[in-house]
Image (cartoon, rainbow, N blue to C red):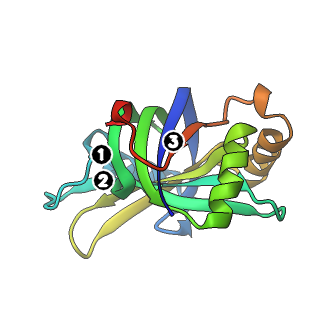
Amino acid sequence: MKTYLKLTFEGIHQYTFNGIINNERVEDEILINEQLSLLGIEKVQLVPEKQFDFPYNLFLFGINVKSSRGTTWSLTTGIDSVINSTNFSLELNNTNLKIYGSLILKVSLKDDFYNDLLVGIEEKKVWIDEFKIKRIESHMKQLSCSFTFSGDWGKDREIIKMINENPKNNDRVLNLEFSKRLPKEWK
């Protein structure tokens, strides 16, 4: 089912680099700093164009919600789904990624996911636990860096548990709205 989502990061959401570069764990601090400096966050394009000039950056993330079966649904989306944005910004400061503003996304959802997402939105139990920034240097070369709530998977699981147990007192909960048709005010 095609649907539109308005994702609003209320306040500044901060994510921390988790040591994963190009899907591999990296421990070398010098290499980490070099790679993060190559991202060039200021060049993230919010609305992809048909022709990209190399190098450019992309971002990806998963919108997560508990399913009615007790597992977690994750909708992987990112720059390719963005149809509009309001004051959306990504700022990289050393190993911290700050995100704020709003994105309007056009996505396709399975019926079961859609139903669980509606419940998650109503109960304020929707979150993004990983954010990826990719720098595309050429058709053959890219750099991918992952950011999570705390940069530590164990601590991140605790944050997710807190979101699901006490969403009203958690600043990691997302403000998410949905519509089957694109509202004029979202254009």
Residue 19 - label: none
> Compared with residue 91, is residue 48 higher up or lower down, i.e. above or below?
below
Q: Secondary structure at mark 1?
A: loop
Residue 187 screen position, x and y as percent: 31, 37
Q: Earlier in the sequence, mark 1 or mark 3?
A: 1
Residue 183 screen position, x and y as percent: 39, 38
Q: Which residue is mark 2?
A: 57
Q: Which residue is mark 3?
A: 95
Residue in the image at 73% along x and 42% along y: 125
**Residue 43, quarter of the rendered image:** top left
Mark 2: which amino acid? Asn
Q: Secondary structure at mark 2?
A: strand
User: Residues at badges 1 and 2 in contact (C-beta under 8 Å)?
Assistant: yes
> Cα distance, mark 3 to mark 2?
17 Å
Residue 107 screen position, x and y as percent: 45, 58
Mark 1: which amino acid? Val
> Cα distance, mark 1 to mark 3?
17 Å
Asked if residue 119 shows in the view, the reply is yes
Foreground: 54 or 67?
Answer: 67
> Compared with residue 6, is residue 23 higher up or lower down, i.e. above or below?
below
Q: Which residue is mark 1?
A: 44
Asked if residue 31 shows in the view, the reply is no
